[in-house]
Amino acid sequence: MKGFCCNILLLTLISSGFPLKNKKTERSKPLCQLAAFLEGGTIPLRIDSGVISQDGDFLDCSQSEKEKCKNMVLNQAQQGTGNGNLTLIANDDEGYTIGDILCDKADSVEENVQNKEVRIYWRLCGESWQRTHFRMSQHLCCIDGLYVPCDKIKNYG
Ligand SMILES: *[C@@H]1O[C@H](CO)[C@@H](O)[C@H](O)[C@H]1NC(C)=O
């Protein structure tokens, strides 16, 4: 079933302030990205991603810039999710929670997610995604594209 929630990218929301401008002219600038992955299945599944860097934030693809990218991703993900709180209201207009948005995103890769971890990843310069230590405090459970706290679902797992 398709989620009807919020057609927005959570991680774009988190890193808001600089929507995808400069797409054409800045193609070769180092891009720092963050993503949310579902973990707990056979392989981690990417459910959402966004761009963290502003034009000129990153000089090159070196190790020190990677550290910087990782730290910015961590800071913004922590701030943007109330430190990983799935029940936090993310969108005042609609009242959707962080969990709802992640469920909406997850719906295209896995329907009715049951008891999975959501972890934040980062990458610089389009290299392979790297895990961070940061994950949402609660596990993700979704029914019809909306978040439901896992302990409210009687018979999962
Ligand atoms: C998560 O957000 C909800 C809704 O704002 C709040 O009631 C709750 O205290 C928060 N939980 C934590 C651990 O901060």
Image (cartoon, grey):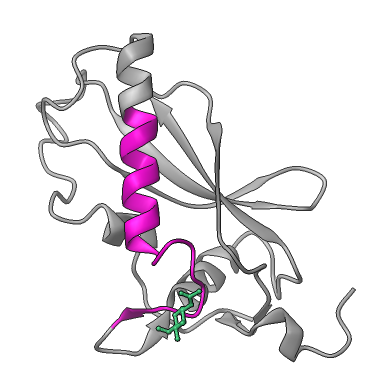
Residue 82 on the magenta span: yes
Which quadrant of the structure image shows residue 107? bottom right
State whether residue 11 appears in this view: yes
Residue 154 location, x and y as percent?
A: 84, 90
Residue 1 location, x and y as percent?
A: 64, 81
Relative to 96, 93 lies left or right: left
Q: Residue at x 46, y 21 (%)?
A: 127
Relative to 28, 123 lies left or right: right
Residue 134 on the magenta span: no
Q: Residue at x 76, y 71 (%)?
A: 114
Image: magenta residue range: 69-91
Q: Nearer the viewer, residue 107 or 88?
A: 88
Q: Nearer the viewer, residue 125 or 72?
A: 72
State whether residue 125 appears in this view: no
Q: Residue at x 44, y 82 (%)?
A: 5
In the displayed structure, 75 sits above or below 150; it is above
Relative to 125, 4 lies left or right: right
Q: Residue at x 19, y 21 (%)?
A: 29
* Quadrant in which the C terminus appears: bottom right
